[in-house]
Image (cartoon, grey):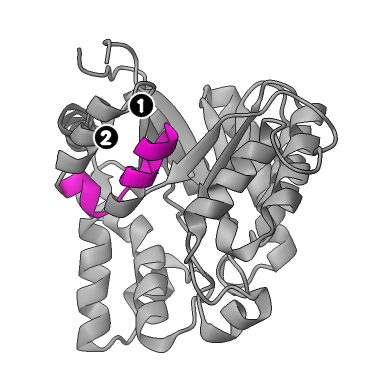
Amino acid sequence: MSAGPVLLSLLDRSRTRSGQSDAEALRATVRRAARAEELGFHRFWVAEHHGVPGAVGSAPTVTTAAVAAATSRVRVGTAGVMLPNHTPFVVAEQVATLAALHPGRLDVGVGRSLGFTAPVRAVLGATSAAGFEDRLAELLDQLHGRGAVTVRPQVPAPPVWLLATGEGLVTAERFGLPVVVGGPLLRDPGPLRRYRERTPRAHVALALDVLVADDRDAARRELLPQAVALARARSRGVFGPLPTPAEAAAAVLTDRERADVDRALAATVHGDEATVTARLTDLVRRTGAAELLVSATPYAEEVEAGNDARVARLVAGLRTGG
């Protein structure tokens, strides 16, 4: 991998906030995309969640269409479309339509995750991720005009990315796809090194929450709402809207939930500018990543906007390894 600037992209999950409507969450996603374009972000990606009160991005290709219509330069796309939930041919049609309307700006991230709960999996008809590679191969064939039925509109195939765990890296290597990774692979980058060595056009984007504030305590306070929401989801099976920072600080949690909050915060990169810069520099060096895909969601939209701007300034000075 040649040395160069680290690309910076943004993942938005259309998170709902306490006291706000689902519709407002989607409108906030579109506003964030317009700000991201002005800040010079490379990509703006949206996620897929079904039946989750706290994240209403249930139709990523539809949300991508709204984001693309509200912007003109930033690359847009999905991170990702979960292929077990969809027929590959329909995904290919939706993707081709987006690519036709916004040529040269679309990226297609795909993953293998199932619905959050058993009832959601049942209504989606996706009770297993078995056969994921067959679905991925079918999608790629259709996008490249190799399917039994021709996808319309006919357009050049946009780049396809894989949201990958350790096992997913083997799939990405087999198909020669770029990857978005997070979690354990940020702590143990050995599998990433093997992926880069074995994949001619390897490209690694790190997905992580980053929040910059005047000091560590202030950063932690802004990240606490999403950590509390995640902890409650794990213990109660309900992923609810983001509480306010005051509500999060006053939340009555079980010992297990408090431990989950601590783990969630520890998995983020947060603090003052010097701390965050050092952590990101180290992550890029150890993983060989060419891109950062940041996704923190503070409760207040103005805090979110300010954080996106600060992260953009910091990452502008980072460079990949030689």
Disc 2 packing (10 Å; few <14; some 14–19; many ≥20): many
Residue at (14, 40) in percent of width and height: 190
Q: Is residue 278 visible?
A: yes
In which quadrant of the rendered view does residue 316 lie? top left
Q: Residue at x 60, y 56 (%)?
A: 14
With 112 as the anchor, is 199 left or right in this view? left
Image quarter (top left, top right, bottom left or bottom right) of the N terminus: top left
Residue 204 horizontal side relative to residue 146, left or right: left
Q: Which residue is mark 2?
A: 195
Q: Is residue 249 above or below residue 1?
A: below
Mark found first going from the N terminus, 1 or 2: 2
> In x, y percent, where is residue 75?
61, 28
For badge 1, the amino acid type reads Ala
Report the residue marked by disc 1: 202
From the viewer's perspective, tell me whether residue 307 is left or right of residue 186: right
Instruction: Give the structural element (helix, strand or loop) at label 2.
Output: helix
Q: Alpha carbon of mark 1 to alpha carbon of mark 2: how far? A: 7 Å
Q: For residue 169, what is the image quadrant?
A: top left
Marker disc for residue 231:
none
Q: Position of residue 174 (x, y in %)?
A: 38, 38
139 is within the stretch colored magenta: no
**Label 1 SS:** loop
Q: Which kind of residue does numbered mark 2 sit on?
A: Tyr
Q: Which residues are magenta?
A: 170-187
Which of the image's four quarters has the C terminus? top left
| Residue nearest the observer in this picture, 306 or 135 | 135
